[in-house]
Amino acid sequence: MLTNSKNLGFTPNNFSIMPFDNGFSGGGASQVSALEAFHGLLMNTFGWSSAFAYNHEGVSLMNGRSDAGEMFPQSEFTTVFNYATSHGLSRFTFWSINRDRQCSPPDNNGRTSGTCSSVAQAPWDFTKYTARFAGATPPQSPPPTTSSPTPGGCSAPMWNASTAYTGGQQVSFNGHLWTAKWWTQGDTPGNNSQNVWTDNGACSGGGTTAPPGPCSLPAWNSATAYTGGQQVSFNGHKWTAKWWTQGDTPGNNSQDVWTDNGAC
């Protein structure tokens, strides 16, 4: 592929390798070794300088446990991240954000999952590396609740099975206050296999579903870009975006990005 690119005179922004799944039981050190070997291959194939080769090299990692049983916890990501930033690599990414959360139990009983990392972590630990690589300051994880709310303190909105919640959002349910650990929809607080809800203790109030209310939310706009968790009103209903969307009409889109929270 590299030779063909050279013959075509094609120089992309970067050539990225995926150093995981067999041969990388050494963690970050073995991944850095693979990147150095690939760096030499780029220089030898294209006749590039060392700095130019680094600037056109990228890496795509796998967070947590790989399909081959290799373990890449946060410490191994740090090793590769430090290498990538100190050598001027142009890409640092991983597979996948959907796995950037802790399993239950944390090691997932020694199995690889498509929905969690199989290592002990806080939500978005691995995504924060890519944010820093892009020059952004990652948000801090919400601080844990250290005290139970006082009676009458169920001021959070009541949990709704149709609503999509993001990490840090709070709801009241069955007389308790709950905090979402990550994105969730339809997972009943206190009764879900992923253990997505943190029980912050008892409070008074807290039913099972949100009552109907007026459409006080902003009207949906086809030109506006929405992120997961944002809410709009459209055709007399309240809608919640499941993920990033723009131009997808609530109730009429192939990706089914909007959750219908009912009439208002």
Image (cartoon, rainbow, N blue to C red):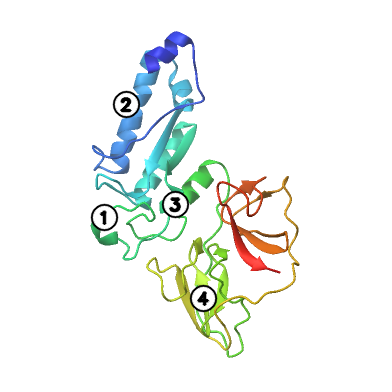
Circle 3: element type:
helix
> Is residue 231 shown left or right of residue 140?
right
* Image x and y of residue 124, in percent: 47, 55
Q: CA distance from mark 1 to mark 2?
A: 30 Å
Mark 2, residue position: 37
User: What's the amino acid at mark 1?
Assistant: Arg
Q: Could you say which quadrant of the image residue 118 lies in?
A: bottom left
Circle 2: element type:
helix
Marked residue nearer the N-terminal end (3 or 4)? 3
Front in this rendered view, residue 218 or 45 = 218
* Residue contact between numbered discs 1 and 4, judged by CB atoms under 8 Å: no
* Residue contact between numbered discs 3 and 4, judged by CB atoms under 8 Å: no
User: What's the amino acid at mark 2?
Assistant: Ala
Marked residue nearer the N-terminal end (2 or 3)? 2
Mark 4, residue position: 178
Mark 1, residue position: 111
Residue at position x 51%, y 42% in the image: 133
Q: Could you say which quadrant of the image residue 82 lies in?
A: top left
Mark 3, residue position: 98
Q: Residues within 10 Å of mark 2 (few under 14, many from 20)?
A: few
Q: CA distance from mark 2 to mark 3?
A: 30 Å
Residue at position x 42%, y 42% in the image: 94
User: What's the amino acid at mark 3?
Assistant: Asn
* Image x and y of residue 253, in percent: 60, 48
